[in-house]
Amino acid sequence: MDHSSSHGGVGTTHKTHGAHHEADHLHQSFWRKYVFSTDHKVIGIQYGITSLLFLLFGFSIMMIMRWQLAYPGQEFPIKWLAHLMGQDNMPDGIMLPEYYNQLGAMHGTIMVFLGVVPLAVGAFGNYVMPLQIGAIDMAFPKLNMMSYWVYFCGGVTMLWSFFVPGGAANSGWTSYAPLSVIATTGQTIWLLGMVFLITSSLLGSVNFIVTIIQLRVKGLTFMRLPFFVWTQFVTSFLLLLAFPPLEAAGVLQLMDRIAGTSFFLPSGLVVSGQALGVSGGGSPLLWQHLFWFLAHPEVYVLILPAMGIIGEVIANNTRKPLWGYKSMIYSIIFLGFMSFIVWAHHMFLTGMGTAISSFFQTTTMIISIPSVIILTALLLSLWGGSIRYTTPMLFALSFLPMFAIGGLTGLPLGLNVSDIHLHDTYYVIGHFHYVVAPGTLMALFAGIYYWFPKVTGRKMNDILGRLHFWGSIVFMNGVFMPMFIQGLAGVSRRLYDGGEQYAHAQSVLHWNEFTSISAWCLGLAQIPFIVNFFWSMKKGQKVNSNPWEATTLEWAATTSPPLAHGNFEKIPEVYRGPYEYSTRGAKKDYTPQNQASEA
Amino acid sequence: MQIPYNETARPDTGLFNAKLGLWLFLASEVMLFGALFSTYVLLRVGAPVWPHGYTILNVPLATLNTVVLISSSVTMVMSWASLMMKNFGKFRLYLGLTILMGMAFLVVKTFEYKAKFVHYGVTLHDGTEIVGHLEEEAEDHVVMLPDMKDGVQPSPVHIGRAQIKRLTNFGPWYSTFLAIYFTLTGLHVLHVIGGLVVNIYLWGPGAKMWKTEPTRFTNRIEVAGLYWHFVDLVWIFLFPVLYLL
């Protein structure tokens, strides 16, 4: 509610911008400028760096787990690392099953809630969206700062959970009851961390929606918004409306764990041969319903901003308007709406009944239509374009087939008959990782390479960028493709020995080693990126404010980086759609949105 | 540097920023309470037995609380209307009344909660359930004074520990009904407290803004009012669902 003037704090009532910039940002301490900043660009960078570190951490966890999967029960080769993880978790360098469960649960939690979403929405959304709509900042700058710091607290809480007795949460990122209710203290900390993260995303999503509706500059109608802004808009609605049910579920689970209630505990539950002394009468299925009511829309939270980035990069590098811009927008709106009524396709095997399963199977098939429209539109956008194979474009191009694999392999999971065979196997892991890793992550990398010059005024190195691209794309497929083979053969997910102690599917277990080696190579392939990131900040090639010759406002109307407060020297006005490339009769092959006439 | 439309409405949307922000926040709140009400429905239809709220909870007290909370919503509107009519004195009076009624709601709720925590239920191994007050708690036995039945006070019951399967007070752990009762009303109480904190700030130190920026201050009262009405509305759903059905 507090939306008082954010800088200087004096209650000024002038509504003009420009003249007051200099006076405002001269006297700011280090803390106000870089740490507790209310500037959306600084907050975007804070989100970006934090989430990239969490992505690296979450990936490192998986690289450690992959040793156990490839060589179950063998001593971990990096002695000091095994030592660091403690004798209780890895006695003599051999990972205990309990510890594997902790790492598995935290890998999922960290990647989804602390890595990808904060990078896609918190970082890119915060930095780019206000620039693209010509706003001087977000609608509520203080809330924006709070949103980041609450997210930060959530992250710290999650990390802290590794150090409580019994270790971190170990019931999977899905925290299914009743297992999670009777789990160790780490689960309580997990719930606490989730409350922080949900609060943060609530603050963020309100801010995003208000900013997009209220702060668009003159002439920027909804149908002139860059596609990226549209994706952030729909994503924010998903975050706003889907997270509260998970918060409710979190509160209920917290009550179960702390106040001794039985929301998720059925009557007559016996744990380790002992009847649990609770009132009973709860429903474990209730947790799954509430959880997936969030977590399905969450899938679209992961993918929509990625599609937005791809849209920007493809339009810019094909030098063509996006093919079917309007259909893409209607598709994401429809997608957002439908994503609220497909959740129970995660629960076909819970015995919900055939009528309900059929309903969710139908809605699931319907929701694949808008995804296909978007992908088709992006593909057709390439047709006849004079494509510039820049580094961001390589990542964007790879997104198309990778996301297609991820999406198409989802169809058998959405049909409730074929799901009986595939449910909870490595096939599922392969499917959603194709969507999120070679899909969303490749798009996010494209975004980093694309907007890096805007943030720093320097381009990232192309040779290192290509090294990063080819390493990533090859090894990502090496990691996830064998999972389809294993899953089809029936290898279950979440097995700490990679399926060794089961009689079936032994013939495909040798893929575990291949997958693990690919994962470690994928880790190595990120080194050029890390080097490039820091090197280019200091030594990268200096570029002008619009190196990609783009049409949208963040390139056409600001410096690189934009002014510390207020973004624009002169508030731009918009005269045309977002992607007027190669317009007939125009002098250049691009006409920026803020250019009044084509000449 | 001033963010556009944080004081005046944007012409094409007709809203100032905070008002739109609050409406969105309320939308998310609807989803939060919606999920909890759905939980209530799901647990109730799945339960073999479910008590009627009025057999366990105090309906007269809750009715009183309903009246108090609805009245506070009325005074909240009056306080905003007073500001619109530039009458700061009346604004203080009405907002003060709103705050007092909010507090009264909490006091009544405290009595209701306390009554539950001193109320006990014991389930014996043969399946019988005795509900009442715990007179005596010894190592080998307890003495229960069962609740009045049709206006008659039954005599105290002496129960050996060996017969007891489960003995607890009426906290959230007692039954699924009480669990959802405490969770829903507890969350609502937290919302009332949140509203009170904001209202007290706006009544006290925050009211200084009236002198410097009257329009923005009026906006703040309007937005705080929207929130307060929502809290009221949640109770209007909670009351029949938990107490009457």
Image: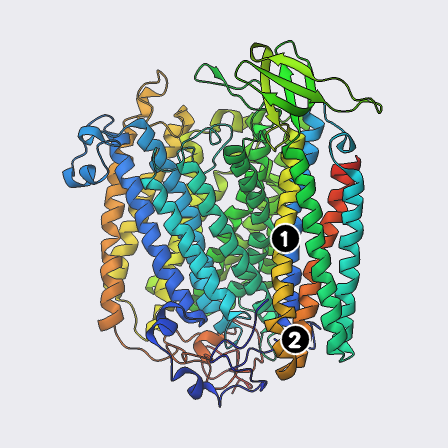
Left or right: residue A166 compared with residue A385: left
Mark found first going from the N terminus, 2 or 1: 1
Q: Is residue A181 above or below residue B9?
A: above
Q: Residue at x 38, y 61 (%)?
A: A48
Number of other residues with Cα within 10 Å of mark 2, as a class: few under 14, some 14 to 19, many 20 or more: many
In the rendered image, residue B61, in percent from the top left (x then y), is placed at: 77, 43
The image quarter in which residue B147 lies: top right
In the rendered image, residue A595, in percent from the top left (x then y), is placed at: 52, 83
Q: Which mark is residue A2?
A: none
Q: Which residue is mark 1?
A: B191
Front-most of A77 and A576? A77
Front-most of B94 and A287? B94
Q: Where is the C terminus of chain B found, in terms of image quarters?
A: top right
The image quarter in which residue A265 lies: top right
Q: Is residue A16 above or below residue A428?
A: below
| Residue A411 shows up from this direction | no
Q: Amino acid at mark 1?
A: His
Q: Residue at x 60, y 55 (%)?
A: A331
Left or right: residue A168 compared with residue B72: left
Q: Which mark is residue B217?
A: 2
The numbered mark 2 sits on a residue in which chain?
B
Inter-mark Cα distance, 2 to 1: 22 Å
Q: Is residue A502 above or below residue A143?
A: above
